[in-house]
Amino acid sequence: MLREVDYGDYEGKTTKEIHESRPDWELYKDGSPGGETPEQIYNRALDFAALAATVDGRVLAFSHGHFLRAVAIAWMKLDIAAAVALYLDVATLSILRDDDHGRVLAVWNAP
């Protein structure tokens, strides 16, 4: 469930390389040819968020950046396209939680 996004034909390519042939490409808007669509990514993220919500206590999750951005968006029940606005560095801490305002992003991209 927390596996990396399936990039299909774009596997192993950088965003810069993809933009050379598709300047307006965005994973969360376009998906990847031969790989996952934004809807598939979002549905996997929703499945994880639903599973995490069943736990009485804390959940610790490790995954890849693109997918963790989708999990945060799914947790807050936002449109998957919003994930592009969440920058995520390697080996950082983020905290999603329920509080008086509902599902929130309590900490994001903390060193």
Image (cartoon, grey):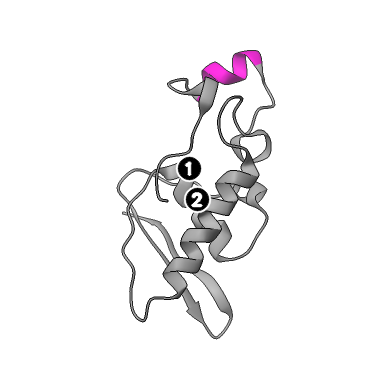
Q: Three-letter amino acid code at disc 1?
A: His
The disc at residue 66 is 1
The disc at residue 69 is 2
Judged from the image, the secondary structure of the residue bearing numbered disc 2 is helix
Residue toward you, 81 or 4: 4
Residue 41 position (above or below residue 108): above
Residue toward you, 94 or 4: 4
12 with respect to 58 (left or right): right
Residue 76 x %, y %: 58, 66
The residue segment tinted magenta is 15-21
Which secondary structure is most common in the magenta stretch?
Answer: helix
Q: Tell me, yes or no, whether the two marked residues, 1 and 2, touch with CB atoms within 8 Å.
A: yes
Residue 27 position (above or below residue 42): above
Q: Is disc 2 surrounded by few (<14), some (14 to 19) or many (20+) residues within 10 Å?
A: many
Residue at horizontal 48 percent and vertical 38 percent from the top = 5
What is the distance, in whole Å, between disc 1 and disc 2 at their CAs? 5 Å
Magenta highlight on residue 16: yes
110 with respect to 29 (left or right): left
Residue 70 x %, y %: 53, 51
Residue toward you, 80 or 3: 3
Residue 35 position (above or below residue 28): above
Residue at horizontal 46 percent and vertical 23 percent from the top = 11
Residue 41 x %, y %: 56, 45
Residue 22 position (above or below residue 106): above
Q: Three-letter amino acid code at disc 2?
A: Arg
Q: Quadrant of the C terminus?
A: bottom left
Q: Is disc 1 surrounded by few (<14), some (14 to 19) or many (20+) residues within 10 Å?
A: some
The disc at residue 45 is none
Residue at horizontal 62 percent and vertical 64 percent from the top = 77
Magenta highlight on residue 72: no
Residue at horizontal 57 percent and vertical 19 percent from the top = 18
39 with respect to 17 (left or right): right
